[in-house]
Image (cartoon, rainbow, N blue to C red):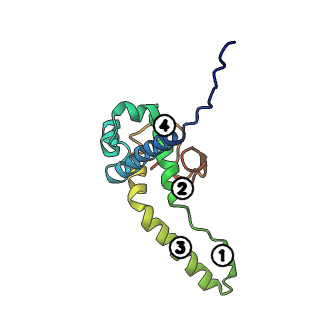
Amino acid sequence: MAAEKATRAYRMGRRAEAMEDTRLRITEAGVELHGSIGPARTTIAGIAETAGVQRHTVYRYFPTEEDQLAACSAHFWGRHPRPDFEGRQAIGEPAERITHALKQLYAFYSEVEPKLVNALRDAVATSLLSAGWSPARGRENHALTTKTSDGPPI
């Protein structure tokens, strides 16, 4: 009688968590460097050093510059959503409603301004314009933690 070999389904569990953590560290390193020195000056070596990984690890998660920019953009805009103006309709006085909306806008742009300035400055120096990116473009489909990006690559 032949012995039957029991098979066990392989689940990545802890390994999947470690991979997601590495992907997040690489993405956050990219966002940090894009904010401090700009996308055009950010290198794969710089991202790898900041994330504490090897260069080939960055390439394994993000094979192209566009993949890396898309992930950084989705991550940054996922953490910095545009103001929600739906609640302002409850404010009856038009002047108060406008004041409330402007305060939200000023707070939002004060928060994202450093990274936005670098992204807009470097858009000309990178492949963003040739890829069809424009500062006025709305939502895009990019993957990391969210499926949409509300602004330029950061």
Specify the label residue 66 is tagged with: 4
Q: Which residue is mark 2?
A: 78
User: Where residue 102 sits in the image (x, y, percent)?
Assistant: 53, 75
Give the residue drawn at x 62%, y 31%.
Answer: 9
Total labels: the figure holds 4
Q: Earlier in the sequence, mark 2 or mark 1?
A: 2
The CA span between labels 3 and 2 is: 17 Å
Q: Is residue 91 above or below residue 140?
A: below
The amino acid at mark 1 is Gly
Q: Is residue 9 visible?
A: yes
Furthest-front residue in this view: 1
The amino acid at mark 4 is Glu
Neighbor class of circle 3 (other Cα within 10 Å; few <14, some 14-19, many 20+) is some
Specify the label residue 111 is tagged with: none
Q: Is residue 35 above or below residue 52?
A: below
Give the residue drawn at x 43%, y 65%.
Answer: 111
Q: Which residue is mark 3?
A: 104
Give the residue drawn at x 36%, y 42%.
Answer: 40
Furthest-top residue in this view: 1
Q: Which residue is mark 1?
A: 87
Q: Is residue 57 above or below residue 5?
A: below
User: Where residue 43 sits in the image (x, y, percent)?
Assistant: 33, 38
The CA span between labels 4 and 1 is: 36 Å
Q: Are marks 4 and 1 in contact (CB under 8 Å)?
A: no
- Mark 2, mark 1: which one is toward the viewer? 2
Q: Earlier in the sequence, mark 3 or mark 2?
A: 2
Q: Earlier in the sequence, mark 3 or mark 1?
A: 1
Neighbor class of circle 4 (other Cα within 10 Å; few <14, some 14-19, many 20+) is some
